[in-house]
Amino acid sequence: MEKARQIFTPKILASTGMDVKKIVEKRVMEEIRKYPPFKRVLIALSGGKDSASLLHIIKNFLPDKDIVPVHLNLGIDGFSEKSEEFARMQAEESGLELTVFNLKKELGFTIMDAKKLYPKICSVCGGIKRYLLNKIAYESGVDIILTAHHLDDFLVRMLKSTLNAKVEELIRFKPYLPRNGNLIAKGRPFWKVSESLILRYASFESLSFITERCPIGMKKNIERLRRAIDILATNENQKNIYLLSLMKIAEKLEKTEVGMGKTQLRPCSSCGFLSSNVICSFCIRVKKIRSFIEERK
């Protein structure tokens, strides 16, 4: 079973699998009910426990929704094949057909190729994934993209932005982002659910999921932040309190000069999707990676 930080409130620690099931499903559905009405939803499936749990909940609680499960095969040696296999299994178990975007087949390179040009690959990989999910969603007529970012992800991301004084990043990372032109709405309904609770949920529901972590995504500074948070927050309730505090800071900053002076978005001159630059970062990176590969032939 996947290693996870086993941190729970006393109530959750003493709870049964059925209690955990109710807690997780209640929190997720409370969030989704806050969203504007939607019919067609894209769920990003990585093959892991988090997205598997999200798909399971949406399928069971919102049977009237048109669900489009999507997996991005990034071409990470020995890992992407397994991830896709589990994603397919998860989609099939929900009676759905998986849409797979294979980076190598579609764009001519893998994340392993990109890593040779961008050693600090995580942020580049994240940007590529966000762009592709939005593109697929837009072209598929999807109303909203749902991803399985959980409480621990939010805490790490927001604390990192705070410590690095990256105010724009802190303001931008939200549980829900409305649609803006050809940028599809995004929801993160797990943002109040811890990773350890999701693991218990997925295990109780007997969901299939890959237990390995991305072999090239183990950033030491992120792991240190995770450990620091686990020391500061000795239970899940404290994690939620810290996260809400960071959210309040972000909301106040959004009302300041920095937050009010939002970057004007315009269509990328290359692909047409909205960007803060004349050419979006995705198009710039794809061009650089392809040129890099050509030069090395």
Image: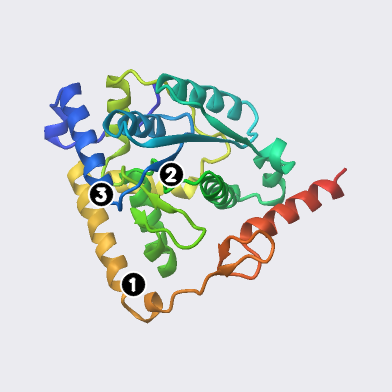
What x and y, as percent, mark residue 13? 17, 29
Left or right, 120 with reference to 53: right
Q: Nearer the viewer, residue 150 or 265?
A: 265
Q: Secondary structure at mark 3?
A: helix
Can you identify the residue that label 3 sits on?
232
Vertical side of 112 occupied by 159: above or below: below
Residue type at numbered disc 2: Glu
Residue type at numbered disc 1: Glu
Quarter of image, res 216? top right
- Image quarter hosting the N terminus: top left
**Residue in view at x 51 percent, y 74 percent:** 264
Mark 1 or mark 2, which has the lower sequence index? 2
Can you identify the residue that label 2 sits on?
223
Residue 168, numbered label: none
**Residue in view at x 46 percent, y 54 percent:** 184
Colour scheme:
rainbow
Label 3 environment density (alpha carbons within 10 Å; few <14, some 14–19, many ≥20): few
**Residue in view at x 40 percent, y 36 percent:** 66
Can you identify the residue that label 1 sits on?
254
Residue type at numbered disc 3: Leu
Vertical side of 276 occupied by 81: above or below: above
Q: Secondary structure at mark 1?
A: helix
